[in-house]
Amino acid sequence: MAFHITQGNPTPLILQPGANASFTIEVYVDGNPVGPGEIIQVKLPEGLVFPPTGEIRFINLDSGVNRPLPIESRDPDGRLVRFKAEGIGNKPEGFYSVNVLAAPTAAPGDRTVTDGLTIGATSAKLSFRVSAPQPVERRVYGTIGANANIISGSGFTAVWGGTSTFTITFTRPFTSPPVVVATAAQGSATAIVTVASVSTTTAVIYTASTSGTWGRLPFHFIAMGLAAPQV
């Protein structure tokens, strides 16, 4: 009697840092079918864990079965988990779905454990790929006074550079220069607020007084763009 155990597609399973997903396992046996109760062991690579609230499910689409299975054991670090298999036939009859969580700090790259799956004396590899974190949309906005004091908003600092120049520094940089819009905080047909330059870390704003002379003026602004996700 020899068991066969494999990781289902997709292989490798791709996750972003901090993401939770599921991979599948298929099992069958040469010779006579085996009743329920064989222990399947899952060993995960560094940076991935079976979460404390994770599930292992047995699914058979042909029979309409989709049920959770009890966890026999889980190591404290979450990288080794064991559960009992359902009955095993001479061909895959359904499959197992196992939760996996990539640590928020997991470095991008491929991870393979040669004995990631074990049943009886048979082992097979488990393969994962941690992808680079994808940028997320970020908005920074607020109101800045004539003395560069922050009247409202967060995620930035402001400095007056003389005459009509204000420099806004974002406390967390964008991955590319954001779109910045600024308007005067006091109504006037002749008030001027100009976005002079924008980078991933700063925005420079010029303001003009209500008489049309360049000078300090309170203003509102909003910066919208992509930033790396916070860990």
Image: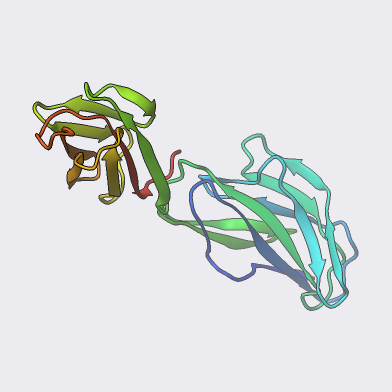
Give above or below for 22 relative to 160.
below
Left or right: residue 7 compared with residue 111: right
Which quadrant is home to the N terminus? bottom right
Q: Residue at coordinates 40% horizontally, 52% vertically from top-left?
A: 135
Give above or below for 155 relative to 22.
above
Q: Residue furthest right?
A: 35
Q: Nearer the viewer, residue 88 or 14?
A: 14
Left or right: residue 9 compared with residue 39: left
Q: Locate residue 32: give its quadrant.
A: bottom right
Give above or below for 58 relative to 72.
below
Q: Locate residue 90: give its quadrant.
A: bottom right
Q: Locate residue 206: give its quadrant.
A: top left
Q: Position of residue 19 (x, y in %)?
A: 55, 50
Q: Is residue 3 visible?
A: no
Give above or below for 218 relative to 188.
above
Which quadrant is home to the C terminus? top left
Q: Residue at coordinates 49% horizontally, 42% vertically from top-left?
A: 104
Q: Is residue 63 visible?
A: yes
Q: Residue at coordinates 52% horizontally, 65% vertically from top-left?
A: 12
Left or right: residue 197 compared with residue 60: left
Q: Residue at coordinates 49% horizontally, 53% vertically from top-left?
A: 16
